Image: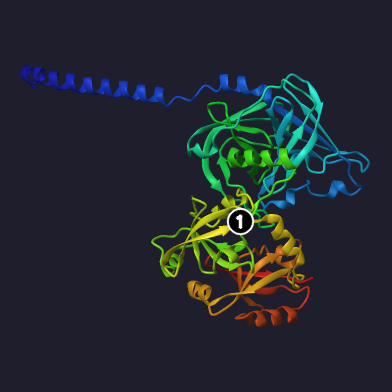
């Protein structure tokens, strides 16, 4: 290469070097903007209002062989996460611990229902080592929230933030007492919102916030903060095979907590809205058959006779896409919305019927009315089920010749053990194809005891085979 060629390359190399330097500068700036937030100031500010909760429960001689109180209310893998030391001797009490936080300076404290359920003594301990005996003002199993009161004043408090404004990817911080390690702080991001985690009773009234914050036994009932130091959630459940954190934690949104707190303070109990329907999600094939532009909404499989939905004109086969101004993307969204509405309130419902959009007005019922109606019904059958006929519209939507829809599953029954749920559609029991209620009743009556029986049912449009045993 000649000298001339070398000289001519210098300007090109200079330009490349300049571009590289500019790119490096931009990358450094980007990294600086994406740096982790400093949580130290936030944690220092809010920690004084976070408390450790110790409970003592008198136990019967066989209590050491029982599952922790309330744990059977949740599906497998989803369990409350508070630490309970089972007694070594039948005469010793069971001791458990959890977390909570002060919501008003005159001594009101919020925690989880399962932390204090069945407790004979509740002791609240602050970071400054002061301890108080607490009384339960009210406790709500369906939301897993409990309101406590201690005799104190001038306490540090936390304020609620707007959980609806949370976005997936936002930073959040949890403070609690995992495994008894007082006032531990962990951080992570919001992984998802509006998670439906139905209990084994089929109840689904909390649109959980999912995070990857490390939560462990003892964190239960503690606060989840945004970066402004506001409580956006109350830590309630984890998903874990080992019992420890694997990055799947679930918190009750502040929006739900504030409504529950207001009712517990006022009445000591929580009144929830009730609609009286059995529903399922909609897949692509169902959406096309029902005249929808895309899979969305809650498909109504059955309507409680003379219930709120029935009185408001909602029919099986309807697809609810909006309720009280809230969009219904999946079937699990509907109980989240209905449960927060006051009984007696009239709301507008947007739905699709036979491919056409309609508007109805429905007066919300009370969930305790649902409980009373269920108690008045005839007893369940040998499988532990109450069922209803599958109507023609449902048959067309699912391309079935017939079947029966489960409206209720009795706790502890053979159907419960087989993990059947309300809304499932049974089409075969043993060698019998079930096209009607009469065929179902006959098959159940003739079913043998203590023998696995072949069972086929549909859930969310998908056929599932299982066995069921009548003891």
156 vs 310: above or below: above
Report how many numbered discs are placed on residues in the image.
1
Q: How is the image coloured?
A: rainbow
Is any atom of residue 229 visible in this view?
A: yes
76 vs 425: above or below: above
Picture quadrant of residue 346:
bottom right
Direction right: furthest residue? 91
Q: Residue at x 27, y 20 (%)?
A: 21
Horizontal relation, residue 84 to residue 255: left or right: right
Q: Residue at x 52, y 38 (%)?
A: 190
Pick the residue in front: 414 or 390: 390
Pick the residue in front: 66 or 119: 119
The residue that mark 1 highlights is: 364
Horizontal relation, residue 93 to residue 175: left or right: right
Where residue 77 sits: x, y (%)?
66, 50
Horizontal relation, residue 234 to residue 460: left or right: right
Pick the residue in front: 236 or 305: 305
Where residue 159 sits: x, y (%)?
61, 29
Where residue 463 sits: x, y (%)?
55, 69
Residue count near mark 1 (Cα–Cα under 10 Å), binned few <14, some 14–19, many ≥20: many
Question: Where is the C terminus found, in terms of image quarters?
Answer: bottom right
Picture quadrant of residue 401:
bottom right
Q: Residue at x 57, y 29 (%)?
A: 230
Question: Where is the N terminus found, in terms of image quarters?
Answer: top left
Q: Tag 1's secondary structure? A: loop
Is any atom of residue 410 visible in this view?
A: no
Where residue 220 sits: x, y (%)?
69, 37
Pick the residue in front: 372 or 30: 372
397 vs 229: above or below: below
416 vs 398: above or below: above
């Amino acid at each position: 290469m000649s000298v001339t060629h070398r000289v001519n390359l210098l300007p090109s190399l200079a330009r490349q070097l300049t571009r590289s330097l500019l790119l490096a500068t931009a990358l450094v700036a980007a990294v600086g903007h994406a740096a982790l937030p400093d949580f130290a100031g936030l944690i220092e500010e809010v920690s004084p209002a976070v408390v450790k909760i110790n409970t003592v429960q008198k136990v019967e001689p066989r209590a050491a062989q029982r599952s922790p109180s309330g744990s059977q209310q949740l599906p497998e893998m989803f369990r409350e996460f508070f630490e309970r030391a089972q007694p070594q001797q039948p005469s010793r009490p069971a001791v458990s611990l959890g977390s909570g936080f002060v919501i008003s300076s005159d001594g009101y404290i919020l925690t989880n229902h399962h932390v204090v359920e069945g407790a004979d003594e509740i002791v609240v301990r602050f970071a400054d080592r002061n301890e108080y005996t607490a009384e339960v003002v009210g406790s709500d199993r369906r939301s897993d929230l409990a309101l406590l009161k201690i005799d104190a004043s001038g306490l540090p408090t936390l304020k609620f933030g707007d959980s609806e404004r949370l976005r997936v990817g936002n930073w959040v911080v949890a403070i609690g007492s995992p495994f008894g390690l007082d006032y531990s702080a962990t951080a992570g991001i919001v992984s998802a919102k509006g998670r439906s985690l139905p209990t084994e009773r089929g109840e689904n009234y909390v649109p959980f916030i999912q995070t990857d914050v490390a939560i462990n036994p003892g964190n239960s009932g503690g606060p989840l903060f945004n970066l402004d130091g506001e409580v956006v959630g109350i830590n309630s459940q984890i998903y874990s095979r080992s019992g420890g954190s694997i990055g799947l934690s679930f918190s009750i949104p502040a929006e739900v907590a504030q409504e529950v707190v207001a009712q517990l303070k006022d009445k000591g109990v929580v009144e929830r809205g009730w609609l009286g329907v059995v529903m399922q999600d909609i897949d692509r094939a169902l959406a096309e058959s029902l005249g929808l532009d895309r899979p969305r909404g809650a498909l109504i499989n059955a309507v409680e006779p003379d219930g709120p939905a029935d009185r408001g004109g909602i029919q099986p086969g309807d697809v609810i896409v909006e309720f009280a101004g809230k969009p219904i993307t999946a079937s699990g969204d509907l109980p989240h919305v209905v449960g927060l509405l006051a009984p007696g309130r009239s709301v507008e419902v947007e739905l699709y019927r036979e491919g056409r959009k309609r508007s109805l007005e429905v007066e919300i019922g009370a969930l305790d009315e649902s409980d009373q109606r269920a108690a008045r019904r005839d007893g369940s059958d040998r499988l532990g089920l109450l069922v209803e006929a599958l109507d023609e519209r449902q048959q067309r939507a699912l391309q079935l010749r017939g079947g029966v829809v489960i409206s209720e599953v009795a706790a502890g029954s053979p159907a419960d053990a087989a993990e059947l749920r309300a809304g499932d559609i049974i089409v075969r029991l043993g060698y019998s194809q079930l096209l009607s209620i009469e065929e179902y009743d006959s098959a159940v009556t003739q079913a043998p005891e203590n023998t696995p029986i072949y069972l086929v049912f549909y859930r969310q449009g998908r056929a599932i085979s299982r066995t069921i045993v009548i003891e």
